[in-house]
Image (cartoon, helix red, strand yellow):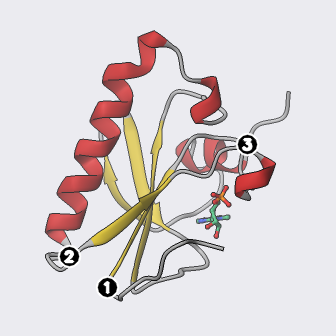
Amino acid sequence: MSQTLFKRIIDREIPAKIVYEDELCLAFEDINPQAPTHLLVIPKKEIASIAELGEDDAALVGHLLVVVCKLAAERKLSNGYRVVANSGPDAGQTVPHLHFHLLGGRAMSWPPG
Ligand code: AMP
């Protein structure tokens, strides 16, 4: 199977504006930001989407969300923010590597389109 775009970012084959990295995950600026803050937090482990998660991934997903929380605090998103994980075609997922979008810095409407 060919490597996903995000795996290539992890491997530094494609440049990205990386804002955080640890042994389990990477966070970088979305190339097409939908809000003043739009970061993607991804695991280094290759998991296609939320639909592919197993019991063994529970701690990893918890870690990703704690990183989202820390990045939101760092960006001073004290008025709120949105965390999105699109899963599959109906949700509009375009990159088959699990990622959490962190969106903030503006008011957002609900429901999403
Ligand atoms: P999704 O549609 O939920 O799968 O989200 C994929 C996201 O990846 C979109 O918001 C894209 O703008 C973003 N994206 C695509 N290519 C890159 C890239 N090279 N660097 C950073 N973000 C990207």
Q: Residues within 10 Å of mark 1 (few under 14, many from 20)?
A: some
Q: Earlier in the sequence, mark 3 or mark 2?
A: 3
Amino acid type, callout 2: Leu
Amino acid carrying mark 1 in the image: Gly
Query: In the rendered structure, which disc, 1 or 3, sits on the residue that comes first in sequence?
Result: 3
Q: Quadrant of residue 24?
A: top left
Is label 3's Cβ within 8 Å of ligand 1?
A: no
Q: Which residue is mark 1?
A: 105
Position above or below: 28 against 63: below
Q: Which of these two is toward me, 74 or 54? A: 54
Q: Residue at x 36, y 87 (%)?
A: 107
Quadrant location of the C terminus in the rendered image: bottom right
Would you name the residue on which mark 2 appears? 77
For discs 1 and 3, the disc positioned in front in the rendered view? 1
Against 33, residue 68 (above or below) is above
Q: Mark on residue 60?
A: none
Residue matched to label 3? 4
Q: Residue furthest top?
A: 56
Secondary element under disc 1, as helix, strand or loop, is loop
Q: How many marks?
A: 3
Q: Kindly indicate whether the residue at mark 2 contacts the one at mark 1 (C-beta within 8 angstroms).
A: yes
3D distance between C-alphas at marks 1 and 2: 6 Å
Residue in the foreground of this view, choosing between 42 and 87: 87
Q: Secondary structure at mark 2?
A: loop
